[in-house]
Image (tube, rainbow, N blue to C red):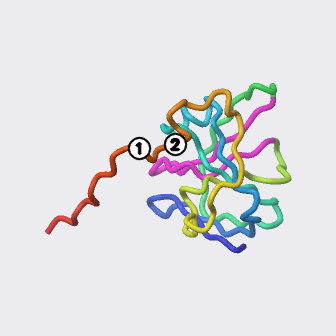
């Protein structure tokens, strides 16, 4: 599936070919912290199927495995864009929140469920607020 993504300000954008069957929710505590949410939704893309426009900032962090994970984000607006490992990564984990076609990428699996917040699995009982109305 062809997708396009961009940060909130448009300073960094990309296009990619991804497999929608590979979308995954990550419940690890690093994803919770860096996203500011209960989990993060990702889709992998092979490096050869990924084209970037603009220059992201990169935050390197040593993961639980001991390997360094580089997280790319927009240096202007802070939008989380992807993560990768190594100097010449074979693939990137795109953050679906920055993908224009994100509604067509429902998660198919989830990982690190041991660190999942207990309420993150079922939101059906949470009150839904009315949509915000545009200001005049």
What secondary structure is found at the residue carrying circle 2? loop
Tell me if residue 7 is in the magenta stretch: no
Left or right: residue 131 versus residue 105 is: left
Left or right: residue 8 versus residue 1 is: left
Asked if the residue under mark 1 is in contact with the one under mark 2, i.e. CB atoms within 8 Å, the reply is yes
How far across and how far down the image is residue 50, in percent? Answer: 74, 65
What secondary structure is found at the residue carrying circle 1? loop
Q: Which residue is mark 2?
A: 122
Tell me if residue 74 is in the magenta stretch: yes
How far across and how far down the image is residue 67, in percent? Answer: 81, 31
Q: Residue at x 54, y 30 (%)?
A: 118
Q: Residue furthest left?
A: 136
Give the CA separation, mark 2 to mark 1: 8 Å
Q: Residue at x 56, y 48 (%)?
A: 80
Q: Please give the range of residues in magenta.
A: 67-85
Residue 87, quarter of picture: top right
Residue 18, quarter of picture: bottom right
Q: Residues within 10 Å of mark 2 (few under 14, many from 20)?
A: few
Left or right: residue 37 versus residue 60 is: left
Q: Which residue is mark 1?
A: 125
Q: Is residue 37 above or below residue 46?
A: above
How far across and how far down the image is residue 128, in percent? Answer: 33, 51
Task: Check the picture and name the quadrant holding the C terminus.
Answer: bottom left
Q: Residue at x 51, y 48 (%)?
A: 75
């Amino acid at each position: 599936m062809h997708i396009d993504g961009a940060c909130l300000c448009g300073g960094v954008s990309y296009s990619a070919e991804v497999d929608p069957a590979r979308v995954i929710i990550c419940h690890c505590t690093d994803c919770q912290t860096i996203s500011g949410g209960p989990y993060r939704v990702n889709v992998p893309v092979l490096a050869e199927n990924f084209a970037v426009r603009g220059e992201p900032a990169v935050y390197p962090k040593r993961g639980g495995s001991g390997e360094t994970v580089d997280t790319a984000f927009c240096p202007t607006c802070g939008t989380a864009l992807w993560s990768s490992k190594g100097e010449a990564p074979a693939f990137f984990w795109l953050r679906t929140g920055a993908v224009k076609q994100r509604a067509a990428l429902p998660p198919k699996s989830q990982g690190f469920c041991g660190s999942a917040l207990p309420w993150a699995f079922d939101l059906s009982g949470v009150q839904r607020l009315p949509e915000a109305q545009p200001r005049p």
